Image (spheres, coloured by chain):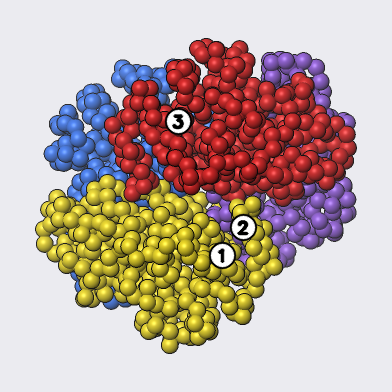
Chain colours: A red, B purple, C yellow, D blue
Amino acid sequence: MIDVYSHHDSINLSMQKKATISIIGASGYSGAELLKILSRHRGVEVGKLFANASAGRRIDEVNPWFRKGLSATIESYDPARLDGSDLIFIALPSGEAMKIAPELLASGKRVIDLGGDFRLADHLAYERYYERPHTALDLLGEAVYGMPEWNRASIGAGKLVANPGCYPTSAILPLVPLLKEGIIEPSGIVIDSMSGTSGAGRSSATELSFSEVNETVRAYRVGRHQHIPEIRAALEAAAGATVSVVFTPHLIPITRGIYTTINASLKRAATSREIEMIYEKHYGAEPFIRFSGSAIPEIKNVLNTNYIDIGVHVDEAGRRITILSAIDNLIKGAAGQAVQNMNILLGFDETEGIG
Amino acid sequence: MIDVYSHHDSINLSMQKKATISIIGASGYSGAELLKILSRHRGVEVGKLFANASAGRRIDEVNPWFRKGLSATIESYDPARLDGSDLIFIALPSGEAMKIAPELLASGKRVIDLGGDFRLADHLAYERYYERPHTALDLLGEAVYGMPEWNRASIGAGKLVANPGCYPTSAILPLVPLLKEGIIEPSGIVIDSMSGTSGAGRSSATELSFSEVNETVRAYRVGRHQHIPEIRAALEAAAGATVSVVFTPHLIPITRGIYTTINASLKRAATSREIEMIYEKHYGAEPFIRFSGSAIPEIKNVLNTNYIDIGVHVDEAGRRITILSAIDNLIKGAAGQAVQNMNILLGFDETEGIG
Amino acid sequence: MIDVYSHHDSINLSMQKKATISIIGASGYSGAELLKILSRHRGVEVGKLFANASAGRRIDEVNPWFRKGLSATIESYDPARLDGSDLIFIALPSGEAMKIAPELLASGKRVIDLGGDFRLADHLAYERYYERPHTALDLLGEAVYGMPEWNRASIGAGKLVANPGCYPTSAILPLVPLLKEGIIEPSGIVIDSMSGTSGAGRSSATELSFSEVNETVRAYRVGRHQHIPEIRAALEAAAGATVSVVFTPHLIPITRGIYTTINASLKRAATSREIEMIYEKHYGAEPFIRFSGSAIPEIKNVLNTNYIDIGVHVDEAGRRITILSAIDNLIKGAAGQAVQNMNILLGFDETEGIG
Amino acid sequence: MIDVYSHHDSINLSMQKKATISIIGASGYSGAELLKILSRHRGVEVGKLFANASAGRRIDEVNPWFRKGLSATIESYDPARLDGSDLIFIALPSGEAMKIAPELLASGKRVIDLGGDFRLADHLAYERYYERPHTALDLLGEAVYGMPEWNRASIGAGKLVANPGCYPTSAILPLVPLLKEGIIEPSGIVIDSMSGTSGAGRSSATELSFSEVNETVRAYRVGRHQHIPEIRAALEAAAGATVSVVFTPHLIPITRGIYTTINASLKRAATSREIEMIYEKHYGAEPFIRFSGSAIPEIKNVLNTNYIDIGVHVDEAGRRITILSAIDNLIKGAAGQAVQNMNILLGFDETEGIG
């Protein structure tokens, strides 16, 4: 069932006391984008900022982009300091949120986790692909997968929202309508993604140094990337059937953006027009999905926006489909989608701050 | 049948009179790479350089990289000036060689064309994908597809060699052994390639300006790129069967290099070891193919070389294979492979100048 | 005399009828940034969009970044269509505004020109550096140089505002306080600037293609760049004396941003503290100037903002000063500063839309 | 006095037993370039390769670019393993060579150090700018500054050659002729350099990650870079007088290359022609200096070469000169110049392997 987006039920911003939003992991790339978005959001104010490595420094010292804008001091994480916060974003590397979330939820806080700890209902898949035990199994049943276009009602009722991964966002949104309508084969789906380096976070890995990334391309974690089970689970939920995908991520020399090229077989000969009608049916009213038919998406058209652009090509025989998508990995692939989830959770118009 | 590479039959460079090699289209990117390679080749000397737009200027004025190295004056094309040339490279945009090659061949010259005019035996495919009529149909039967690893004998006996396209080189070399051995399905092969901008030649197209290419990715000519029939024809020759491929090229912000990710279904469950043995069998003695097993290729490892690097990943069930390849589009994808063909044609060791 | 920035006199946005703003040259890079800013400005609405090459197409077709945002149709320039416009931005290549501005001003319109036609009071300098005759000499006396930090009162009273050049903005703002205070020598000032490619506009020049710009640097128009007389005139006005500068622009492989490194001699031994106090005195209240003392500016800290970041280093002997500045060439160096001027002209708070 | 380059005295390569050359620090960027050059040098063979972090691994595993080329195993540094080596390159971070060189020289080895430990005769300057004590003071008098164009005789007679820094090479070579001829003022010389990231070596510093370097520029170590005393010392030797320079390095998003823009005052009015004659006089016979008059150098013209390109602009009044230079920081700025020094030391033609 489709979760219909509507402008109607959102609360009146001008009459509202502002909600207080805190961020754990404020000094990373996703943290910075969260801060930029929250600063222009009319219904919230920024609460506490936590980040252990830069604790004691001001946010505009750590990231001078914020000078003359934000000057809050970053603190070492301390849950006792979150009393006045209405909602908390966790923007830490995967593996950290499962240490923190239990006590936050126990104290009644609503939490949106931008990492991978609560995206997989199947903890065995988590342990295999993330290569560590899961230490907050109790929360796996409670967590809601935060893909607004398909999960609005659950998100709105949730306490713990698992914000989707960047690659999964770029692959799941284009594929779900086709799987729901049963027009493509659920097996043999090939997903090749190209990502900029900011997806790896603020990193000191030699292999992410400019000298090593510029003027080259490399695939990585082929066949074992932690986003594989996340993609598969979402597609199987849409298809109501087993789905087989091959997902290959590539690192390319751009800072921001993900481009995903998907190939699938059509179950029966179909025309471009039929495909367009499927996307129109499912996404025509969606504020952040721009379906462009045969016009080819480009990363630059979505930079600094919460849009995903989707284009398609059906081969002459109508038996194979190529689907192309582009997102800003730090916005629709992270902070933007997280604020979209926050807007749903707190009753704001879904586009507030990101429209 | 495999064309075995051998060091034995090549001519003795120290006793030989040097061959004279001319270039039509000397001022483009492929022309420059040809000149760099020929300058260090011990068996040849550079003859005439032609390029209409820069005629009358010295090569080191047009391309100051050559200062203190080469200073020949570029001339307007005039076949009468080719009397002393033993072999001629045509490094012009596709569509030009078919105007020039007939008279060159008629006068007994050997020609290697780096463009697309003589790569397709099927002129209808040419006309459909190159979107122009073919005006030298007589030569289509005579032209030899210049992929040395699979065609050495014919190249050596040929008069007109069609140097393979850059994308096809990156896709055909990894796939042929698997198709020859019948281990992958010949249908549903998915080829996603990423290319730097030099593949488009020295261009004034706005869409290739730095501002339009940097920090973005875009697929292009989806489903209609002119390299599709070239790839299909070579794969069908290897498979001895109809092959279906989906090929999607992407422009990414690098100057040089092509990275190609290929997905195919295995006909039967196979292990990585079996796949490695196939590559070892076919390419173990090849001087310019580096098969790396599960180690992942990167463009930077092949820059400024004539190598193609190939790596593979077989999924757990042994039913799907992902093949990764990397080349320098201007070397193995153009000038390097062209000199490899020249070496075969003129009887030099195949690695001379490019090893 | 310093033009003091104040929040007080701006008009009340909520009670105001929105001003209508039109753009001539809407399809270029500066035009796009103007549209982004105007779309979030609370006091204006976008009027007509003109651009000859893309006339008849929608803005979101020409630039798909605007999809689901702006959909106005671009028109061929026709002054009769500007009746309802309160202010007009001209975002055309230099040489075009002087053809258009006279009739616009004659019809009572207020105009902000982002090109170079009205920046130089001295038409001989214009003709020498822009290498064309000036055809609207009558307007040269009327035009106001639109550098808000030094010219607020005149801008507010003006009809024709010449928006400063990108390089001049990055060089003049750092130098004026030091010249006004007489602490640096007005001769022998060395200005080395590095610019991204968007400064050249949407271009089809081969020399601006990705292949030609990536992985290289080149100086250009050494000793004859058209921004030299603009810089000199502004500095001489500040110094009240003859100023000699050497300005060398460099093209580097980034899309956006200008970094400017300035070296000058101090008239007398001075300390860093004295220099800081000068900047604090002149710029402490400026909303868009961030002086950072010895902290070194970076382009990334100003991207997508209207800030100029300025840092300084005084040598040990206190006799030489190095001044570093960074701007986003399309914002503070073009569209952002232009809207800042518009805000002054129309009585809005100076930071509206760009703060 | 000028050190005249001549082809005459070099030894006959065909009759010579090959010299054995070892490298300490073989796995870094300069080490890789040394290996590439030595592999094509006709008079040497590669001896031992040392690198502690990658000891025990093969060079083609550490750097797959060398696959099918070099396969030597890297060893932990052990001077006892250098018995058969005729010359040793030290390609380690500054501060390491002074620990190693004493015992190498004591055992009679000839050493070329690519780091900074032996470039400054003044150990106080070393300690101030390198921020550590110098622990091999005895060798400072013995070390020869390895700038072949000005120091051939001493290099040829030396035991310990200090290879110049990358920035100093780009600044000293353009300035020495003008200072020697006394045509520019020795005070107030302004040197602004832009460098790619490979100059920092293979690094895991977060500030050198792709995300932090791409699409930005930043000056660094302003007024305190360790190359300042090296530049000043060489210029003072040339001028025979005190020289004052301001040197500001900038990091820009390229992998390789340095571009240096120098501004100086002319002592008396001079013409471009006079300047050209000075460069012609001093550098006309130099194999690796390409003076281009008013033609503007670009980094791409020197990539993968041992050339320095130099261009000049004299202002109209003939009182100010702007000098532009470009080098490949890993070749002329490191490994190429080091091999040039090796060729002099061992009696090869100076261009062997790098011509």
Screen quadrant of the C terminus of chain C: bottom left
Asked if residue D133 can be seen in this view, the reply is: yes
- Kindly report the distance in space between the C-alpha atoms of the residues bearing marks 3 and 1: 38 Å
Amino acid at circle 3: Asp
- Kindly report the distance in space between the C-alpha atoms of the residues bearing marks 3 and 2: 34 Å
Q: Residue at x 60, y 16 (%)?
A: A141
Q: Are dots 2 and 1 in contact, CB under 8 Å? A: yes
Q: Above or below — where is D186 with respect to D51?
A: below
Q: Residue at x 55, y 16 (%)?
A: A139
Of callouts 2 and 1, which one flags the residue occurring earlier in the amino acid sequence?
A: 1
| Badge 2 density bin: few <14, some 14–19, many ≥20, Cα 10 Å | some
Q: Quadrant of residue A179?
A: top right
Q: Secondary structure at mark 1?
A: strand
> Observer-nearest residue: B89 or D241?
D241
Number of marks: 3
Residue picked out by circle 1: C46
Position of residue B209 measured from the top left corner of the image (x, y, whole percent) = 57, 57
Q: Do marks 3 and 2 share a subunit?
A: no
Residue picked out by circle 3: A86
| Badge 3 density bin: few <14, some 14–19, many ≥20, Cα 10 Å | some
Residue picked out by circle 2: C70
Q: Chain of mark 3?
A: A
Screen quadrant of the N terminus of chain C: bottom left
